[in-house]
Structure formats: C-alpha cells, structure tokens
Amino acid sequence: MRIEVTRSGGFAGLVRRALVDTDGLDDAEEWHRLAEAALADGAGPSPAESSVRDGFRYEIAVDGSPGVEVGEQDLTPAQRDLTARALAEGTRL
C-alpha cells in the first residue's frame, strides 16, 4: 500500500508531501488499518466552508486514489494520527 499525505496552507502557504510505502514494513498492518479508517471517515467541509483562516488542509490518498481532503480542525483521530505519522516517518516528496 502506498499512502500519500499532502499538507498545504497555513500562514506561509507552504506545501509538504510525504509518501509511505508499506511493502516490507514490520508495522504494515497498523498502517493499513489507520489508512482505511482515515479514508472511511471521509472528507471535511470545503475550504470555503472552513472557519479557520490560514489553517492547514490535508489530502490523504492511498494507492493513487483521489482520497480525501480535510481541514486541520476537522481531522478525525484516525486522520490526525495518519497525517502526523506519515509526515514524520514517510519519504518527503
């Protein structure tokens, strides 16, 4: 499974992307459960509906799927865990 997380926005408008390829990882099952839960939780409100100015937006895609886009304030626990972990442990793109 290939998990890609993109964080954009914020005050400076910077974009940060990371990729986690779970093939061969000892904790691949944990990554799979987290990714499936994050996608199942779905997308948050559109950027126009977001109430947080200059907040971060996250896009979560798995195996090249369109994925979901969520504002930082609307991240579910699974989405928050996945995005934080992927950006910390994944390969930067």
Image (tube, rainbow, N blue to C red):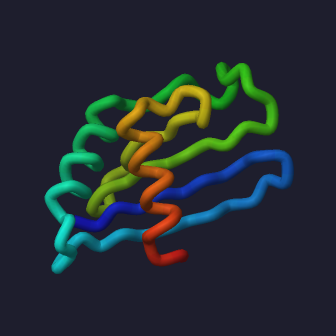
| Residue 55 left/right relative to 83 | right
Residue appearing at x 43%, y 30% in the figure: 76
Give the percent coordinates (x, y) of residue 68: 42, 41
Residue 39 x/y as whole percent: 31, 40
Query: Which quadrant is home to the C terminus?
Result: bottom right
**Above or below, comparing residue 24 to residue 35 in the picture:** below
Work out whether residue 93 or residue 33 is closer to the camera in this orientation and state it. Answer: 33
Kindly identify the residue that appears in the image at 67 percent across and 24 percent down.
50
Question: So how many labels did they put on this image?
Answer: 0
Q: Quadrant of the N terminus?
A: bottom left
Residue 12: name its quadrant: bottom right
Q: Quadrant of residue 73?
A: top right
Which quarter of the figure has residue 57?
Answer: top right
Nearer-the-camera pick, 76 or 69: 76
Q: Is residue 4 above or below residue 67?
A: below
Q: Residue at x 66, y 20 (%)?
A: 49
The answer to whether 4 appears left or right of 1 in the picture is right
